[in-house]
Amino acid sequence: MRVALGVEYNGARYSGWQRQSHVNSVQQEVETALSRICNHPVEIVCAGRTDAGVHGTGQVIHFDTHAEREMVAFTMGMNTLLPKDIAIRFAKPVSEDFHARFSATARRYRYVIYNYTYRGAIMSEGVTHFHHPLDETKMQEACQYLIGEHDFTSFRALHCQANTANRTIHHLSVKHQGDYVIIDIKANAFLHHMVRNITGCLMDIGLHKHEPVWLKELLDLKERAKASATAKAAGLYLVDVDYPEHFGIPKTPLGPLFLPDSDS
């Protein structure tokens, strides 16, 4: 039996999603709990590996098991075993041709900036604090230059191992909600650090260091060194993954949950 799970996690105390030796990861915690539920070793596949400190509200995984269990074992049972900063949002049996990574058609991230003079305490792990005022109007104006298919070499990590830098951004917006500035981006796929590198550039535009058209110039240059510094991990969330309808993967409210939900 193949099962898909929706996973939510606070990545602050984990060295990323991927299982690694000598450090704790989200994957390790989920596999340990699943192996107890199934009574045999379980390996999972995720829709998108996130870096150290990055959060997930819409992560999707799949795994195979020969254990006969009700789906409630993979929701309530798993949530009993998992640490408080990792939770299962849904469980659904899926066909053998479903693959959490390769069946995905798009992924969506949100980056949350607490844009206030002084740092906060309550949600300090879930946002990036930035004390200089950001001009979200200029940031939103800049977004238009990245929509569509482009070579995103200027926005990929230097050690990115992807075969091509071509990606298609379906949606990119910047909104101000109270003291928060939220960058919302959806694409067919992402390069390593692509969202955080775009965020760093948008923040510099919001500081009036550059005009919005600078993003187009960066695309044309295809030089990572010409772009801004990579934004911190703390404010980044994987919030949604799209799959073909016939797989029937449930949709959950977009996160992070302390902000009003919007699908626009």
Image (cartoon, helix red, strand yellow):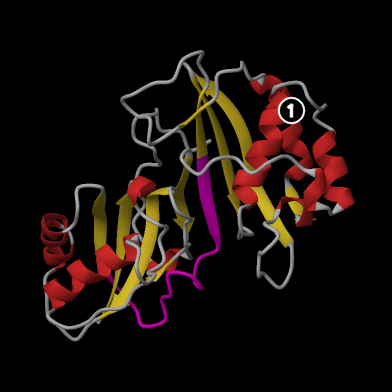
Report helix, strand or loop for mark 1.
helix
Depth check, front residue: 81 or 238 = 81
Tell me where the magenta segment starts and ends, as one range: 92-110
Residue 191 appears in the figure:
yes
Q: Is residue 157 left or right of residue 211?
A: left
Q: Residues within 10 Å of mark 1 (few under 14, many from 20)?
A: many
Q: Vertically, is 240 above or below 198?
A: below
Which residue shows up at 19% across the image and 53% down it? 83
Q: Which quarter of the picture shows residue 38?
A: bottom left
Q: Is residue 92 left or right of residue 232?
A: left
Q: Do we see residue 92 in this rendering?
A: no
Task: Kindly identify the residue that appears in the image at 60 percent across and 45 percent down.
Answer: 196
- Residue 56, horizontal then vertical, whole percent: 39, 50
Q: Residue furthest bottom?
A: 66
Name the outermost residue toward the front: 22
Q: Is residue 40 left or right of residue 251?
A: left
Task: Give above or below for 182 relative to 196.
Answer: above
Seen from the viewer's position, the closer of residues 24 and 72 is: 24
- In the image, is residue 178 above or below residue 253? above
Is the N terminus in the top left, top right, bottom left or bottom right quadrant? bottom left
Q: Position of residue 99 (x, y in %)?
A: 43, 75
The image shows residue 20 at horizontal and vertical percentages of 39, 70
Task: Quickly name the residue at label 1.
Answer: 205
Asked if residue 124 is among those painted magenta in the image, a careful observer would answer no
Between residues 92 and 24, which one lies in front from this camera angle? 24
Q: Which residue is located at x 16 percent, y 55 percent?
A: 79
Q: Which amino acid type is shown beneath numbered disc 1?
A: Ile
